[in-house]
Amino acid sequence: MPITPIIPINPINPIKTMKQPLITLFTLLLSALTTTNAQNIQVHYDFGRNIYTGAEAGRSKVTITLEQFKADNLGQWYYFVDADLSSRFFESAYTEISREFKFGKQSPFSAHIEYNGGLSRNGSFQQAGLVGAAWNGHNSDFSKTYSVQLMYKQYFKSYDTTRSYASAQLTGVWGLHFLNRKLTFSGFIDFWRGEKANGHGCLVILSEPQLWYNFTKHFSIGTEWEFSNNFVYNSDPNSTQTFFWNPTLAVKFNL
């Protein structure tokens, strides 16, 4: 969950990401931007299944996210792993791993490469590779951060019901600290071309803004609101709904 991300999967897949962040993305761990190496664990209780009792009947209620940001002389690494849990099973694990190479020490532009993929109890996510450019920035004290990424995205064939196809993705990431860093508002938004089960193309939108109250440097309580269109698998055969709002209640431990 989002730096934050990201993260995005084939919209016909019934399993939730995070992302993206927990967050597609190169996403910038907002707390990580003031250090060269930062890691956190987030635990989210998801209310989507309670809101959409038919369309999201199989949605996991608990997601555990591990994410890490590490900067070096050439650029930075970022990854997150989302683990979706139910009362009976470990439902799925999804990851996004990205690497950026700076074009120069003072340049805001970087080359960006990324891998998205994972496994679930019922199969796997359709894998994707991304390559493109990122424009990253911040103010003098890192209380405001941003990143814009434009990437070519290639989906790879995984099952007979899927096919390899080319796509493109536009990602925006932001972070704002308030009240002497007691409040953090962070998040990302992704736009990319997906494919429906019938093979028709569609615009997929996924955004996961987060709001955290930071009790200490190591412990926060907050919420994430996932907004999506053409992303969540609708399990209700009598519904054509494509837009969903899935809020969470969460805790975060900065390691």
Image (cartoon, rainbow, N blue to C red):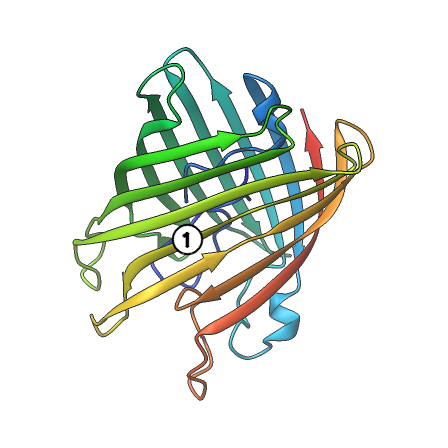
Residue 242, image quadrant: bottom left
3 displayed left or right of 97: right
The N terminus is located in which quarter?
A: top right
Q: Nearer the viewer, residue 228 or 107?
A: 107
Q: Position of residue 117 (x, y in %)?
A: 35, 44
Q: Position of residue 134 (x, y in %)?
A: 35, 35
Name the residue: 37% across, 56% down. 191
Residue 103, image quadrant: top left
Confirm whether residue 23 shows in the render: no
Residue 198, image quadrant: bottom left
Confirm whether residue 47 shows in the render: yes
Q: Amino acid at mark 1?
A: Asp
Q: Position of residue 96 (x, y in %)?
A: 41, 39
Q: Position of residue 5 (x, y in %)?
A: 49, 44
Name the residue: 46% across, 80% down. 241
| Picture layout, residue 115 above or below residue 254 | below
Q: Which residue is mark 1?
A: 190
> Which element is circle 1 on?
strand
